[in-house]
Image: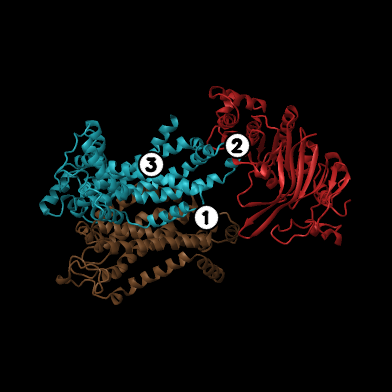
Amino acid sequence: MTAVLAIEDLSLVFRTRHGTVQALEDVSLTVDRGEIVGVVGESGSGKSVMAYAALGLQDPAARILGGRIVFGGLDVLNAAPDVMAATRGREIAMIFQSPRTALNPIRKVGLQIADVLLEHTAVRRSDVRQQAIDALARVRIPDPERRYEAYPFELSGGMCQRVMIAMALACSPSLLIADEPTTGLDVTTQAVIMDLIREMSRGARMSTLLITHDLAVAGEYCDRIAVMHAGHIVEEAPTVELLQRPAHPYTRQLLASTPTPQSTIDQLVSIPGQLPDLRSELPACRFSARCDRHVSACDERPLPWTALSPNHLVRCRVPL
Amino acid sequence: MHFFWKRVLGTIPSLVGVVLVTFLLSHALPGDPAAFFAGPAANATSIAEVRAKLGLDRSLPVQFLHYVDDLRRGNLGNSLTTGQPVLHDLLERLPASIELTLFALIFAVAVGLPLGVWAATRPDSAIDHACRALVSVGAAFPTFFIGLLFVYLFYYLFGIAPQPVGRLNEILYTAPPRVTGAYTVDSVIAGDWGVLRASFAQMVLPAISLGMFALAPIARITRAAMLQALGSDFIRTARASGLPARKILFTYAFRNALLPVANVLGMVFSFLLGGSVLIEQVYGWQGVGAYAVTAVISSDYAAVQGFVLTMALLYVLLNLVIDLLATAIDPRVRFES
Amino acid sequence: MATSSFALNAAHAFGENRLTLVAVVILALLVLCALFGPLLAPYPPLMTDGTARLVPPSSAHLFGTDALGRDILSRVVVAARLDLGMAVAAALLSFAIGLTLGAIAGYFGGWPDRIISRVMDTIMAFPLFVLAMGIVAALGNSVLNVIIATVVINLPFYCRFARAEVNVRREVGYVEAARMGGNRALNVLFHYIVPNILPPMMVQVSLNMGWAILNAAGLSFIGLGVRPPAPEWGIMVSEGASFIISGEWWTFVFPGAALVLAVFCFNLLGDGLRDLLDPKRRI
């Protein structure tokens, strides 16, 4: 299976007035053709930072310390700006959380889709309106002709997310990055949107990178899941394997703290401690302070990957 | 359309307020209003005559009704200094002031908008610092001082500006036949390019002096609004969609930044209308501002009142235009109520 | 109020922001001129000298002399009293009245709010300088009336700000607690809420002060308020204006520069105070 996206040993920091934030360290991840890969972690774990880097959209204060990102043969980190601009929206697309603020508030949604089509495809101006309407229809927006003329504030959150998906998929990209696409939506809408994403992925044999803090959502929709903690990927496995045989203490704790319909308030467990301060001197394993299995060997660098099976990797000296 | 009329009707409270305030200022303050209108040279008999003629011996509400009725008929009284009806004096001079203010606005916008955009796209660069310095320092200069400095520098020292004798050097040129009252426009209509050049040359320095004070808030708000727009979520989406930099900057960021700019235009117009009085004084511009200054000094009260009323009405109208402009830029406004 | 930590913060912020510190120093000098002008001036500001008319800046007269032979430096120094005095009086009065009205409007809402807001909107319906002209013309040409006019046109600024700030704080925890504790509404308003909005309002006073100075100077420039021979920056610029075309620039440049300096420093002070209180608002 050819990798559509390959992130190899990516290390990234932010230089800020209050110190250097070690946002990502030796992060590696691949997304193969047609699969849905989930990246799960708490907020601040670096999931979005990694996603923006894959698009070449990292913050101006970011510095790449090492590693590569290869997208379909293109070296993203060293690509020319115009090459990247041509790739974004065309070959890689991204959708964001809070869809209403992620759309231009004073521009009709249909026009926003049309802008993308005009930029990346050879469509004629006379045809672009219809193509945009078709894109809206593909994501099951009712009455797409009328919705073309709508402004984001006239649409519900779920509708706005559909519009964003339509915009992202308008040029049939080979990779879709979905950054917390369901955050801010009500539960029913969440399911509907996720179903839509999955359907669109399967239908177009498109790869999807799903970023979420919700392990339940990842478990439901992803083929493979990578777990992130404080700028590290700590475990990576096919979904069923990860959920049934978690090997990293953090993964286990994440699973334990994920509420199920049957759990009661007293059954909810939270993970002790907090994310370490990424500006400070950090140990080899950034989970050590919160881990109950910590041994002195855990502090030796470099922290190795252990393969429990060919596709189940964990970065821990004392895996479960 | 329904929305348009609603906005127009929304100006009525302001109009009522303006008429009421100008009425109170002349009729309801301590002192004898009849003496005001009769002027400083009046004696007891003429004051009594004026009192009867203007109905100032009636009760206040009745006086107000008379006042409104007079306004309706366009009767703003007579000017003591010119002897003419105030309305006539004002209408004759209004185009000059509007022309000046318009050019000042065009200057302020033409320089302020690009400057603010440029500064926002290159944070912490030389142009950004220059913009911020201009904004701070420009806001500290009194309009009349800038005007005088410009005259000194460009007329006296460098000799590149024409003599500040007002709208046109009457010795060398004749004013074009009056169509709008604005010399620049009328000379184009008459095809008189010499007068166009001359009147435009006379306009440059006053318009820029007046516009400088308006430039500061426009540049500042544009810069701030662009910075905010460029940092917002929808720009991130636009970048992620691979839209070209130019489109992101203008169609996406700039149009959104125009909203706060439109909002600050109200304050800018207040400055411009007030500042025009001072600039007309400095440059000898024959507009309503200069007329009003003479009127105030010579206690020509009807003229002052007419002036205040006219400027206020103009301001209400301008604010209405800005309001409608804001709606054109931001469709959300239409749905507010 | 944690005044000691505020002072520490202030010292730190001012240390960081040299420009604000410079502004404070210059303002202090101007206040000194305002208070002790006649003592500091090298010549009596009203003393004319027919032999020394329109003398350019020289060692005897650092800023030169005007058409009546009066020393401009002395007049500029002494003028600080009128210019700053008028502006400060107007700003403080406007602040006090605007704060009270705005607080009432913001706290009680309903009819008080509607009436007060309507009045403020009516004032704002005029170009402010024009309204000031009208008020001075109506009340009579005097310094007091210029101050009154300046108070009126600055009212909406303070009133709206106070109204917004009080509105935001109305439902906050400690206010609720005060209400529960049985305090009467006015008490809650003026003893609990208002002290908390004073810091941001101080920023507004400082930012507004420059505008008040410009306003008063503008009115004197066109002949309203201050009369000759009183030394005041606006009127001095007006007197000096006639000499531009003969090149005697010092007659109007120095008083004008004094105006610019004063306004600029108040603006810097206001910006510095705002950064101190709420760095996020820094533009």
**Chain letter, brown:** C
Chain B: colour as depicted: cyan
Q: In this view, does A183 lie above or below C178?
A: above
Question: Between tags 1 and 2, which lies in front?
Answer: 2
Q: Which amino acid does label 3 sit on?
A: Asn
At mark 3, the secondary structure is helix
Instruction: Tell me the chain of label 2.
Output: B
At mark 1, the secondary structure is helix
**Chain letter, red:** A
Where residue A134 sits: x, y (%)?
A: 63, 24
Is any part of residue A15 visible from this angle? yes
Q: Evaluate whether label 3 is on the same chain as label 1.
A: no
Question: Which residue matches tag 3?
Answer: B319
At mark 2, the secondary structure is loop
Crowdedness near tag 1: few (<14), some (14–19) or many (≥20) residues, C-alpha within 10 Å: few
Q: Evaluate whether label 2 is on the same chain as label 3.
A: yes
Is B40 on the left-hand or right-hand side of A268? left
Instruction: Tell me the chain of label 3.
Output: B
Q: Which amino acid does label 1 sit on?
A: Arg
Where residue B214 sits: x, y (%)?
A: 37, 49
Instruction: Tell me the chain of label 1.
Output: C
Question: Which residue matches tag 1?
Answer: C281
Q: Residue B242 carries which label?
A: 2
Crowdedness near tag 2: few (<14), some (14–19) or many (≥20) residues, C-alpha within 10 Å: many
Q: In this view, does B294 lie above or below C30?
A: above
Which quadrant holds the N terminus of chain B? top left
Residue at 89 percent of width and 51 percent of height: A320
